[in-house]
């Protein structure tokens, strides 16, 4: 989080606009004259931020899905034991990820879902909410029938969100 403070504006722009460009002055290697170089970074982008800070840039925060850890005292011993099993857990997760196919996910419930939209923060959270639902459906892809549709001369394969994904 401390490193993000200096790059906060650029990160927000990259996340919202999907790209970031910056101009910088440097010497032309052939002429030695100062010239402008443009650098461009294109998204999509994922930002993982960890902190114990109480105050976080509100504009950056409302573009993020915020997850908090369980800080209960009982987690201390469990955390030590879990670290012992870390490699086996990571191997299981990596193997599970290898089973996932890149599929399109259709959400037939999207228009029926309600979400507060009176504030900018909640409007942005709505997109994250729909993305979370699609992610859960994608993780459950082997429990769903594959469907297909013809689109512009190509057959697209997809799965659909179901009520289990919504729960």
Image (tube, helix red, strand yellow):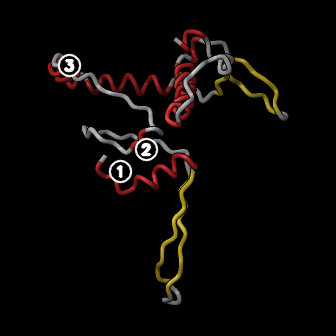
Q: In this view, does 106 lie above or below 63?
A: above
Res 145 → quadrant: top right
Disc 1 and disc 2: Cα gap in Å? Answer: 10 Å
Q: Is residue 12 above or below residue 166?
A: below
Sequence order check, earlier mark of 2 and 3? 2
Sequence order check, earlier mark of 1 and 2? 1
- SS at circle 2: helix
Disc 2 and disc 3: Cα gap in Å? Answer: 27 Å
Residue displayed at 48% across by 49% down? 12
Q: In this view, does 91 lie to the left or right of 23?
A: left
Label 2 or label 3, whichever lies nearer to me, is 2
Residue displayed at 52% across by 33% down? 119
Q: How crowded is mark 1: few (under 14 residues within 10 Å), some or many (20 or more)?
A: some
Q: Are marks 1 and 2 in contact (CB under 8 Å)?
A: yes
Q: Is residue 83 left or right of residue 18?
A: left
The label number, if any, that marks residue 4 in the structure image: 1
Q: How crowded is mark 3: few (under 14 residues within 10 Å), some or many (20 or more)?
A: few
Res 76 → quadrant: top left
Q: Is residue 82 above or below residue 43?
A: above
Residue displayed at 41% across by 39% down? 61
- Residue 143 location, x and y as percent? 57, 11
Q: Can residue 87 be seen in this view?
A: yes
Q: Is residue 159 visible?
A: no
Q: Are marks 1 and 3 in contact (CB under 8 Å)?
A: no
- Residue 53 location, x and y as percent? 26, 40
Res 147 → quadrant: top right
**In the depicted view, which residue is nearer to us: 39 or 98?**
39
Residue displayed at 27% across by 38% down? 54
The label number, if any, that marks residue 72 in the structure image: 3
**In the depicted view, which residue is nearer to us: 86 or 14?**
14
**Which residue position holds label 2?**
60
The label number, if any, that marks residue 160 in the structure image: none
């Amino acid at each position: 989080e401390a490193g993000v403070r200096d790059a906060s504006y650029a990160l927000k722009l990259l996340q919202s606009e999907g790209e970031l460009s910056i101009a910088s002055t440097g010497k032309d290697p052939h002429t030695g004259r100062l010239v402008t170089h443009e650098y461009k970074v294109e998204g999509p982008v994922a930002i993982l931020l960890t902190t114990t800070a109480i105050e976080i840039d509100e504009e950056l925060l409302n573009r993020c899905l915020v997850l908090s850890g369980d800080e209960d005292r009982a987690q201390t011993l469990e955390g030590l034991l879990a670290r012992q099993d870390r490699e086996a857990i990571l191997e299981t997760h990596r193997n599970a990820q290898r089973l996932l196919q890149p599929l399109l996910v259709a959400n037939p419930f999207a228009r029926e879902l309600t979400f507060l939209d009176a504030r900018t923060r909640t409007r942005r959270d709505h997109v994250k909410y729909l993305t979370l639902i699609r992610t859960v459906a994608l993780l459950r892809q082997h429990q769903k029938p594959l469907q297909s549709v013809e689109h512009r001369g190509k057959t697209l394969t997809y799965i659909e969100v179901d009520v289990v994904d919504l729960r």
